[in-house]
Image (spheres, helix red, strand yellow):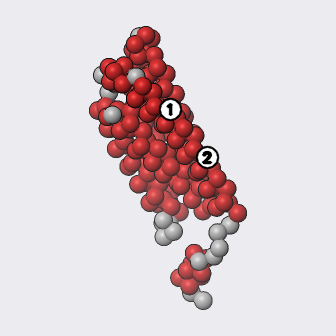
C-alpha cells in the first residue's frame, strides 16, 4: 500500500466522536449569536429612527477593513487545514491567521475608542448597549480563537487543527452576517 492509498483510506473513515462534539459547539455558537442578532434586528425595527441616528457615529470603513482582515485570516486558516499542507506551512498559516485575528481585535478596539463617547447619549443607549454586547462578544471569540490558533500551531495535531479552523470559519460567518446588520442596515 502506498502513501496515497493509505491517505485516501484514512479520508474515507467514519467520523470520530470529536466530530459530533464539534458540531454541538458550532450550533451552540450559532444559536447564541443568532439570538443576539435577532434581538438587535427587532430593536432596530422598533427604534428605527434612533438606530439610524446612532449608526451615524459608527465607522463603517473600519468595519470594512476588519471584514477584509478576518476573511483573509480565514483563508490562511483554510490553507493550514489542507490535508496536503506540510507541517511547516500549516504552522506558518496558523500563525498568520492568528496575527490577523489580533489585528482584527486592534482595529475593533480603536473603533470602540471612537464610539464609546456616544454610548452615554440617552437617544443611543439601546443601540450602543446591543452594539457593544454583540460586537464585544464576537471580539472575545476572535481573541480567544487567535490564541488557540497559536497554541495549535505550536503543538500541531490534525484533530485540533480541524477543530480550531472550523470554529474560526464560524467566527467569519458570524461577522459576515453581523457586518451588514449593524453597519449597513
Residue displayed at 40% across by 22% down: 47
Residue lying farthest to the right in this orientation: 17
Q: Measuring from the top left, give residue 12's x and y in whole percent.
A: 59, 77
Left or right, 93 with respect to 26, comes to left
Compute the Cα span from label 1 to label 2: 17 Å
Q: Is residue 22 above or below residue 61?
A: below
Residue lying farthest to the front in this orientation: 46
Q: Quadrant of residue 128?
A: top left
Q: Quadrant of residue 59?
A: top left
Left or right, 91 with respect to 103, comes to right
Q: Measuring from the top left, give residue 61's x and y in whole percent.
A: 29, 32
The quadrant of the image that shows the C terminus is top left
Residue displayed at 48% across by 36% down: 37
Residue annotated with mark 2? 28
N-terminal of the two: label 1 or label 2?
2
Q: Quadrant of residue 161?
A: bottom right
Q: Measuring from the top left, give residue 159's x and y in whole percent.
A: 62, 61
Q: Is residue 137 above or below residue 124?
A: below
Left or right, 183 with respect to 132, comes to left
Residue annotated with mark 1? 39
What is the secondary structure assignment of the residue under circle 1? helix
- Whether residue 139 is visible, yes or no, is no
Q: Tell which tag, 1 or 2, sits nearer the viewer.
A: 1
Amino acid at each position: 500500500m502506498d502513501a496515497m492509498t493509505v491517505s485516501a483510506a484514512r479520508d474515507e473513515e467514519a467520523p470520530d466522536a470529536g466530530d459530533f462534539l464539534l458540531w454541538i459547539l458550532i450550533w451552540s455558537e450559532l444559536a447564541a449569536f443568532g439570538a443576539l442578532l435577532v434581538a438587535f434586528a427587532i430593536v432596530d425595527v422598533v427604534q428605527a429612527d434612533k438606530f439610524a441616528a446612532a449608526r451615524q457615529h459608527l465607522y463603517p470603513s473600519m468595519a470594512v477593513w476588519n471584514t477584509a482582515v478576518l476573511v483573509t485570516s480565514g483563508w490562511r486558516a483554510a490553507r493550514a487545514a489542507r490535508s496536503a499542507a506540510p507541517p511547516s506551512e500549516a504552522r506558518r498559516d496558523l500563525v498568520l491567521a492568528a496575527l490577523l485575528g489580533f489585528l482584527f481585535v486592534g482595529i475593533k478596539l480603536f473603533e470602540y475608542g471612537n464610539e464609546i463617547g456616544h454610548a452615554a447619549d440617552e437617544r443611543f443607549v439601546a443601540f450602543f448597549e446591543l452594539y457593544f454586547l454583540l460586537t464585544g462578544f464576537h471580539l472575545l471569540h476572535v481573541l480567544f480563537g487567535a490564541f488557540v490558533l497559536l497554541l495549535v500551531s505550536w503543538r500541531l495535531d490534525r484533530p485540533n487543527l480541524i477543530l480550531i479552523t472550523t470554529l474560526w470559519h464560524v467566527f467569519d460567518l458570524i461577522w459576515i452576517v453581523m457586518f451588514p446588520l449593524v453597519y449597513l442596515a
